[in-house]
């Protein structure tokens, strides 16, 4: 191992600033702990005049990313600019220059990662990506190392800080969706395009990485089912609370009858489950292994310092290993794995029907549900609007998604139903 490791960062935004701060302030501590002397040699950003709130030594800042990628003295290139291009080109060039790479760019890894990891393997360098999932929680290390002895049974995660922040604000403080989103953006949690956060895209990027590590499959973003939180109303949050649940944007990957499920959607979680208490920007990942049983990891899922903490840990890890290897855990499975189609999953369900307030409506709806083998666990109807529509809430026992979709299609065609039915999948044990 070299006694001094030169680091170059591309992208001096939220995470770049946090990473630089940690490298400037904690490098002595890291040296004492590991013997590794990390030196932040260059930081590239398009704008090097803006005040980032930290003092950077003369000569470190540059507007030229090539000055990082092609500097022969730089050992590790840290990509924190985000987006697909030119980030991918910069990373590939750095790899070809035999530099290790660390990135927090889950969008890039989920969609182009197979090619990037193959290029890294070819060149005998590593790509670290601890910061790409769940911010400061070392979940990548957990799956690759801590639980290496386990067949992974299931992973459930709240892994988007922005959407969890929004749902928490809507639940606890009755804040409007758009105001909560603005606040998350101001705090530096949201993606450059916040639809990635609220439409489940960012969560799906991260789930792609977790599924690969859990089951050894190639990164398969296009196979992830995704649904965001934009259709969830304050009314649904209230009904859920009345029924004893919290609504969370959940990422789920699990083995089900030999098939791998990969899905992201709002989910009702019983109040008594630990994961339902994960609020604000915090993330949590529940991992069940066949040997270890249930485990849960919790921490800040976004922000400058928590994410910077994961970036710096990756640099140290790579330097300590120092042998250049492909991302352990990705792509080892034989080709006969199968991803489960969304229509084939089974779950419990919450339905909010917009039903006319008149006699016989409930029996029409429950009749259709019954025809599709969907059995009702409880019903709530609030308010009276004779001649108008009211929300009719039904909680159903475990049913097949295919049956649910067909039943809703039929119910939404009833003349007594005035608007599209909203449904939310429900986790927990059957009563
Ligand atoms: P920011 O937008 O805050 O920072 C990105 C920085 O990169 C900006 O300063 C941007 O400049 C700069 N940049 C853009 N293009 C170039 C270029 N060609 N050369 C040099 N610099 C460039 O993003 P974040 O720090 O929030 O996110 C960075 C990455 O980390 C993303 O992949 C994100 O998904 C990921 N991430 C973010 C987390 C967070 O909490 N924010 C947590 C975990 C991961 P300009 O502003 O002028 O465009
Ligand atoms: N926008 C992301 C989030 C950043 O809110 O979780 C962390 O990956």
Image: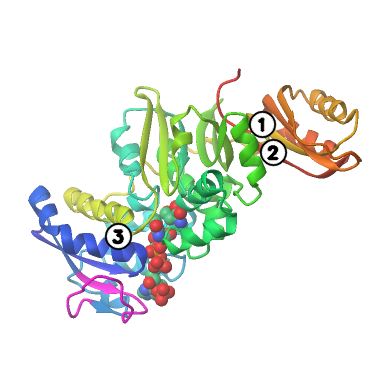
Residue 215, given in percent of the width and then of the height, sits at 44, 36
The question of residue 73 being in magenta is answered with no
Residue 92, given in percent of the width and then of the height, sits at 36, 65
Mark 1 lies within 8 Å of ligand 2 (Cβ measured): no
Mark 2 lies within 8 Å of ligand 2 (Cβ measured): no
What's the residue at 23%, 63% (across, down)? 21
Q: Could you give the CA–CA distance between mark 3 and mark 1, rounded to whole angstroms?
A: 43 Å
Q: Secondary structure at mark 1?
A: strand
- In the image: residue 179, left or right of residue 1: right
- In the image: residue 116, left or right of residue 258: left
Q: Which residue is mark 2?
A: 423
Residue 129 visible in rendering: no
Q: Which residue is mark 3?
A: 101
The question of residue 51 being in magenta is answered with yes
Q: Which residue is mark 1?
A: 349
Q: Could you give the CA–CA distance between mark 2 and mark 3, rounded to whole angstroms?
A: 42 Å
- Using the image as rendered, state which of residue 45 and residue 305 is in the foreground: 305
Residue 390, given in percent of the width and then of the height, sits at 80, 40
Residue 220, given in percent of the width and then of the height, sits at 51, 47
């Amino acid at each position: 191992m070299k006694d001094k490791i030169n680091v170059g960062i591309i992208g001096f935004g939220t995470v770049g600033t946090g990473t630089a701060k940690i490298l400037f302030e904690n490098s002595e501590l890291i040296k004492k702990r590991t013997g590794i002397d990390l030196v932040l040699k260059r930081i590239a950003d398009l704008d090097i005049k803006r005040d980032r709130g930290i003092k950077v030594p003369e000569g470190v800042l540059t507007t030229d990313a090539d000055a990082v990628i092609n500097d022969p003295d730089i050992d590790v290139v840290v990509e924190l600019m985000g987006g697909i291009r030119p980030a991918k080109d910069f990373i590939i060039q750095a790899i070809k220059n035999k530099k290790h790479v660390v990135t927090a760019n889950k969008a890039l890894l989920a969609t182009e990662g197979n090619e990037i990891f193959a290029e890294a393997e070819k060149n005998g360098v590593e790509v670290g990506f601890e910061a790409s999932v769940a911010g400061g929680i070392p979940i990548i290390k957990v799956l690759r190392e801590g639980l290496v002895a386990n067949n992974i049974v299931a992973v459930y995660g709240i892994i988007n800080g922005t959407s969890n922040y929004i749902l928490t604000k809507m639940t606890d403080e009755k804040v409007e969706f758009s105001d909560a989103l603005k606040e998350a953006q101001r705090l530096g949690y949201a993606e450059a395009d916040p639809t990635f956060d609220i439409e489940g895209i960012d969560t799906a990027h991260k789930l792609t990485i977790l599924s690969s590590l859990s089951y050894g499959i190639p990164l398969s973003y296009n196979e992830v089912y995704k649904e965001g939180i934009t259709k969830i109303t304050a009314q649904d949050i209230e009904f859920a609370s009345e029924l004893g649940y919290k609504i969370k944007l959940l990422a789920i990957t699990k083995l089900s009858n030999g098939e791998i499920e990969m899905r992201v959607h709002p989910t009702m979680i019983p109040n008594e489950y630990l994961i339902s208490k994960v609020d604000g920007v915090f993330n949590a990942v529940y991992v069940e292994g066949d040997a270890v049983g249930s485990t849960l990891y919790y921490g800040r899922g976004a922000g400058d310092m928590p994410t910077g903490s994961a970036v710096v840990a990756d640099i140290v890890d790579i330097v300590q290993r120092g042998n250049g290897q492909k991302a352990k855990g990705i792509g080892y499975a034989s080709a006969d794995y199968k991803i489960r189609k969304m229509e084939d999953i089974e779950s419990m369900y919450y339905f909010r029907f917009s039903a006319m307030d008149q006699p016989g409506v409930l029996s029409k709806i429950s009749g259709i549900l019954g025809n599709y083998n969907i059995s009702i666990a409880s019903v709530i109807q609030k308010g009276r609007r004779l001649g108008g529509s009211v929300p009719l809430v039904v909680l159903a026992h475990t049913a097949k998604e295919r049956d649910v979709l067909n039943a809703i299609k039929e119910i939404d065609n009833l003349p007594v139903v005035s608007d599209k039915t909203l449904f939310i999948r429900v986790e927990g044990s059957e009563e």
